[in-house]
Image (spheres, rainbow, N blue to C red):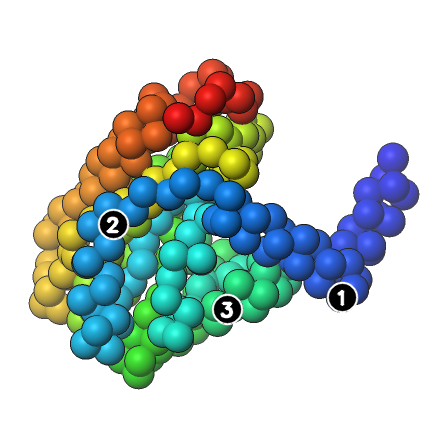
Amino acid sequence: MSRFKTLTKDILKSNAVQSGLALAIASYVKLVHLTCRFNQRRADIPERFWADDDTFICATWHGQNIILPPFWHNWRTLKILVSKHGDGEIIAKLCGYLGLGTIRGSGAPKGKVEKSKEKGGAAALRAMVRALQHGASIGLTADMPPGPHRVAGLGIVTMARLSGRPIVPIVATTRARLVLGNTWDKFTIPLPFNRGAVVWGDPIYVPRNVDPEALEGYRQQVEDALNQLTQEADAMVGRRSQATPDKADAVPDTREAG
């Protein structure tokens, strides 16, 4: 068994295999986008930023973000934070196929500063702040592995404070979907040929001189906004909200999307 695991890891490290997997996933994302009837709500929020060439932090939850790239205006630069380890190479290649840039590195749960340094968290934060101040928006998940899922960390509000750019929450979902219950983030795979929803939230600005207690309040504001948008998006497609996931979401709903 150990030999099989080693062989599998070696295969997944192959550049050709990683590129093939990334291309297959990108093709699937485009298929879902083309075949689902998406209803987009409050799209005027990002459009105002795009019209003024202003940047922002595009925030979503882990496990909900695979379908989002097609809804970004590809002539505007969006860079995604991608881990340097694990499946990061595949995700980085996937971003490239979907017209997005990347910044390599990742954060770490509270209290694990050494882990964050190993993964390039501090350097990635500086790179994201510079990108926001020089014409690129940033795509970031508000929650962090190993969870709990749908609990925002302080990293995203810290970046908003340092950069002076707002956080704009966004949620996307489909009526028929697979939810992988054995993953920490309840990773969601949207299914093609059904109904979908994309919901944008109001910008959240974090003052540069905010104190730690107030920063926690902004973190909670981001978390609450994303959970409310999740409920709104699920209601739009006729589903019980993912904000309170349960085992029923572990199987696809194959009923008529309309």
Q: Amino acid at mark 1?
A: Asn
Which type of secondary structure does the marked residue at label 3 adopt?
loop
Which type of secondary structure does the marked residue at label 2 adopt?
strand
Q: Earlier in the sequence, mark 1 or mark 2?
A: 1
Above or below, 103 relative to 45 = below
- Label 1 or label 3, whichever lies nearer to me, is 3
Quarter-of-image position of residue 27 = bottom right
Q: CA distance from mark 1 to mark 2?
A: 36 Å
Residue placed under numbered mark 3 in the picture? 99
Q: Amino acid at mark 3?
A: Gly
What residue is shown at x 35% (from left), y 49% (from top)? 60
Task: Say which mark, if any, is on residue 15.
Answer: 1
Above or below, 177 relative to 76 = above
- Label 1 or label 2, whichever lies nearer to me, is 2
Task: Say which mark, if any, is on residue 218.
Answer: none
| Residue that protrudes farthest toward the bottom in the picture | 134
Residue placed under numbered mark 2 in the picture? 200
Disc 1 and disc 2 in contact, CB within 8 angstroms: no
